């Protein structure tokens, strides 16, 4: 049994920018902050986490009803993982937007990771970038070999979609400072931002 | 009888405001100058639809004691009524409408109209105006001010109309100018619930003691003491003691001499004030401006528990303004863990020309508090 730990209750954090980007969880929030910094848009986009996917509709409505949102926000972007089905994920986000009753003047944008079409998640996108980035290709091959070995030995068979998380963790384990989530890794500069794999996401962020 | 929906037109900063979704306990948030206190005032005025002197009392906001006056206060010029009207447009009537939980509808129109009688100017004012003229005449004289009276037109649940008129002192009545003459065309009584208003300024100790004294021979006294014992287990009884000819509340905590309540901390004094107001308004509405005043955030959970017990026991509906995130969180945490989620949160926002209300449901309150989204 996990012992209960007293945690400080959240304090209000006012919205201060007109472009608001909502991410699925804290690690993607850090990831987006880092990539926004890379493309020099960090001071223009406020990134907040909406927690888990089941919370999106309620959190988006709560944001939309805050006075700062009404006074400031002109553009809302939402980023979440496709998991097994990008179309279904997009449908759920659209329903949350509909439910939030956003003011007409607020632009809505949605990005389903990894590429709006394929199944997957933030780690899928990151490991695709690693695979296509020449200086990291060898590391990618090592990670692939590692999992092939595990699979052939009957030790572990990665899930066809969520296996990207295992591969990302293995790749990040090759760094001196291990035990990182993708968001912290993004702040440390471990993802190859200049890879064309990130271009669609960058374009989405610039269009907010 | 709980308020179900409430509508305001042309009152203070509200051109038009409609609010529904009022559970038993309601918090009203919003930035400064969005009309939180004015909303409480509007509800209070509507619950006293035969008492225009209440409007005169509110015209003096910020000048009086903590409790809204129920006796006529100084009415010197009709200008003092100006601030009650939206944009100070005194000839656009104020309209306050409510629907209660029993689906009855009540409407109060408040307007100024040309008085049917002539005002007199008090000698002191005439002397101010004529200083240097050498006049020694101190007899009655006609005022140069507009001759207006405040009219309350109340339509009760059965559709009867009752007109109550407040007129400043008039020639020949002998009523001092600082008092209002009240006339009514219909002997019927209001069928609205009673309301009590606690302002931001604390009530004098003697006034709280006086209010408590009305509960001495009732079971409500025991109820208040039982609630307070949850916060202060040593408390045996609350008594009224007289010091320097003034009554005040004191606690018997088993130490021999009574301990004045004021010596037991601001929090318990404030809570007693609130509980006394609740139990003196059975079945009615208690309105509290800035409920967190005098209360440390760490006791707010217990305070909400005490208020919930008292309000349910006395059948009271409570509306309070707040600026405090901790206060909203404590209220939510208490009601979320209670048998019934009796809490509503309404935030007022000022727009270019008006004020609009956002009413939060439980899920949105919870999501906002847990994610750090501002609700005030």
Image: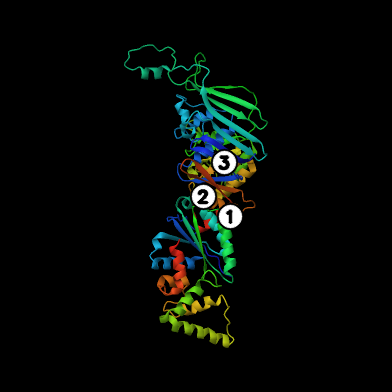
Q: Position of residue B267 (x, y in %)?
A: 50, 45
Query: In this figure, which residue is indicated by the disc labeled 3?
Result: B18
In the picture, which quadrant includes the N terminus of chain B? top right
Secondary structure state at the residue bearing disc 1: helix
Q: Are marks 3 and 1 on the same chain?
A: yes
User: Closer to us: mark 2 or mark 3?
Assistant: 3
Density class for disc 1 (Cα within 10 Å; few <14, some 14-19, many ≥20) is few
Label 2's element?
helix
Residue under pointer 2: B327
Percent position of residue B168, x then y: 50, 21
Considering depth in this image, is A130 or A59 the residue closer to the camera?
Answer: A130
> Dividing the picture into quarters, in which one does residue A96 lie?
bottom right
Mark 2 / mark 3, whichever is N-terminal? 3
Labels 2 and 3 touching (C-beta < 8 A): no
Q: What label does residue B363 carry, if any?
A: 1
Q: Dot 2 surroundings within 10 Å: few (below 14), some, or many (20 or more)?
A: many
């Amino acid at each position: 049994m996990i012992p209960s730990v007293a945690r400080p209750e959240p304090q209000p954090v006012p919205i201060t920018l007109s472009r608001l980007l909502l991410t699925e969880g804290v690690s993607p929030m850090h990831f987006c902050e880092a990539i926004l910094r890379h493309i020099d848009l960090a001071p223009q986009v406020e990134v907040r986490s909406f927690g888990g996917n089941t919370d999106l509709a309620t959190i988006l409505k709560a944001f939309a009803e805050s006075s700062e949102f009404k006074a400031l926000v002109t553009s809302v972007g939402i980023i979440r993982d496709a998991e097994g089905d990008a179309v279904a994920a997009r449908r759920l986000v659209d329903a949350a937007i509909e439910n939030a009753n956003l003011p007409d003047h607020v632009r809505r944008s949605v990005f389903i990771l990894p590429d709006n079409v394929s199944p997957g998640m933030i780690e899928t996108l990151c490991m695709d970038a690693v695979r296509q980035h020449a200086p990291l290709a060898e590391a990618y091959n090592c990670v692939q070999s590692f999992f092939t070995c595990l699979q052939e030995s009957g030790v572990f068979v990665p899930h066809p979609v969520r296996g990207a998380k295992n591969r990302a963790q293995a790749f990040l384990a090759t760094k001196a400072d291990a035990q990182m989530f993708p968001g912290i890794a993004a702040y440390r500069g471990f993802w190859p931002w200049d890879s064309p794999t990130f271009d669609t996401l960058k374009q989405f962020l610039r269009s907010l | 009888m709980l308020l179900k929906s409430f509508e305001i037109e042309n009152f203070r900063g509200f051109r038009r405001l409609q609010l529904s979704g009022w559970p038993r306990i309601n918090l009203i948030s919003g930035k400064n100058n969005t009309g939180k206190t004015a909303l409480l005032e509007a509800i209070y005025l509507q619950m006293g639809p035969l008492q225009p002197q209440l409007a005169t009392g509110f015209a003096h906001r910020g000048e009086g004691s903590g409790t809204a006056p129920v006796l006529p206060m100084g009415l010197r010029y009709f200008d003092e009524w100006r601030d009650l009207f939206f944009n100070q447009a005194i000839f656009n009537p104020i309209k306050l409408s409510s629907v209660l939980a029993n689906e009855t509808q009540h409407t109060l129109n408040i307007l100024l109209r040309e008085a049917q009688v002539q005002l007199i100017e008090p000698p002191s004012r005439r002397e101010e105006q004529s200083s240097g003229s050498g006049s020694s005449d101190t007899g009655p004289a006609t005022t140069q001010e507009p001759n207006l009276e405040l009219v309350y037109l109340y339509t009760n649940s059965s559709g009867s109309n009752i007109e109550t008129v407040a007129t400043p002192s008039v020639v020949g009545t002998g009523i001092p100018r600082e008092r209002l003459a009240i006339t009514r065309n219909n002997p019927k009584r209001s069928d609205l619930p009673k309301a009590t208003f606690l302002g931001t300024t604390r009530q004098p100790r003697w006034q709280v003691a006086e209010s408590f004294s009305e509960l001495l021979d009732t079971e409500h006294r025991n109820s208040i003491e039982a609630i307070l014992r949850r916060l202060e287990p040593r408390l045996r009884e609350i008594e009224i003691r007289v010091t320097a000819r003034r009554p005040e509340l004191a606690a018997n905590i088993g130490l021999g001499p009574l301990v004045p309540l004021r010596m037991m901390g601001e929090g318990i004094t404030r809570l007693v004030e609130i509980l006394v107001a609740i139990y003196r308004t059975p079945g009615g509405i208690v309105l509290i401006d800035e409920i967190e005043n005098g209360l440390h955030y760490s006791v707010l959970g217990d305070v909400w528990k005490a208020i919930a017990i008292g309000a349910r026991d006395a059948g009271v509906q409570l509306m309070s303004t707040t600026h405090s995130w901790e206060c909203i969180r404590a209220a939510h945490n208490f009601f979320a863990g209670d048998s019934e989620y009796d809490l509503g949160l309404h935030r007022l926002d000022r727009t270019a020309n008006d004020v609009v209300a956002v009413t939060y449901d439980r899920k949105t309150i919870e999501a906002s508090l847990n994610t750090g989204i501002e609700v005030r």
